[in-house]
Image (spheres, grey):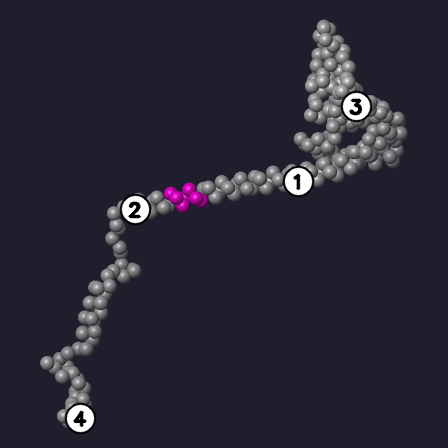
Amino acid sequence: MRDRRRIDPETGQVRPPDLDQDPTQEEAGAEVAADAAAGPGPDQPVVDQPGQEAELKAELDERTADLQRLQAEYANYRKRIDRDREAVITQAKASVAGELLGVLDDIERAAQHGDLTGAFKAVADKLVATLERVGLEAFGHDGEPFDPSVHEAVQHDTSPEVSEPTVTAVLRRGYRIGDRIVRAALVGVTDHEPGAAPPAAEAAPGEAGDGNDWFEPVDVDAAPPERGGNHRAED
């Protein structure tokens, strides 16, 4: 057994180093043994386990599906936001235009009586042009087919000269912005007379009115008749 004490207990002197034994060799051997017991380090390659590649592929497919679903949800969200924004804009335009319909009615009455001249006409034309730019469109013309979704019938008659319910009198012009009805048109409707022969010739499509002439003749001074069951157009 080797005595490794550096001081001799008998003489009290410091012993010279043992040149036959390198102390770093024992330390290196201890480190090698510890590394062997601890297993492979993080920088060392790990042997793939059976089925590990399939598990990684399944996880990748799952994450890809999640990403695609999120992208689809975001696209639908953007479409819904754009649609809601357009609806709000249209609603705002319709609200402002609705407040000006009374002014348009007065302008139309002035045009029918020949009073729309000079500076008054210039201002009226600018107002109409401005409302047209925001999408306001007038409708309700003699000869156009009756449409209960945009026309409000307050008079009803029959005639052999028409083959279907037709607008034959416009008491108040209607207006719309896009698909939104700002105000329905008050009209008189004429239906085909039962038992009468069909008309020989019908007006070509588009002759009833092109929707651009806001001030064509209309009986705006006539008061709408009392509404009742006998004055409503039959569906």
Mark earlier in primary sequence (2, 4): 4
Residue bearing the label numbered 3: 227
Helix, strand or loop at mark 3? loop
Gap between marks 2 and 4 measured at Cα: 68 Å
Q: Position of residue 17 (x, y in %)?
A: 17, 84
Mark earlier in primary sequence (1, 3): 1
Q: Residues within 10 Å of mark 4 (few under 14, many from 20)?
A: few
Gap between marks 4 and 3 measured at Cα: 133 Å
Residues in magenta, as a range: 61-67
The residue sitting at 10% across, 81% down in the picture is 1
Does residue 125 appear in this view? Answer: no
Q: Residues within 10 Å of mark 2 (few under 14, many from 20)?
A: few
Residue 104 falls in which quadrant of the image?
A: top right
Disc assigned to residue 53: 2
Q: Are marks 2 and 4 in contact (CB under 8 Å)?
A: no
Which quadrant: the C terminus?
top right
Residue bearing the label numbered 1: 88
**Does residue 29 show up magenta in the picture?**
no
Nearer to us: label 4 or label 3: 3
Q: Are marks 4 and 3 in contact (CB under 8 Å)?
A: no
Gap between marks 4 and 1 measured at Cα: 102 Å
Residue 110 falls in which quadrant of the image?
A: top right
Gap between marks 1 and 3 measured at Cα: 34 Å
Q: Give amino acid for label 3.
A: Arg
**Foreground pick, 216 / 84:** 84
Does residue 131 appear in this view? Answer: yes
In the image: residue 198, left or right of residue 169: left
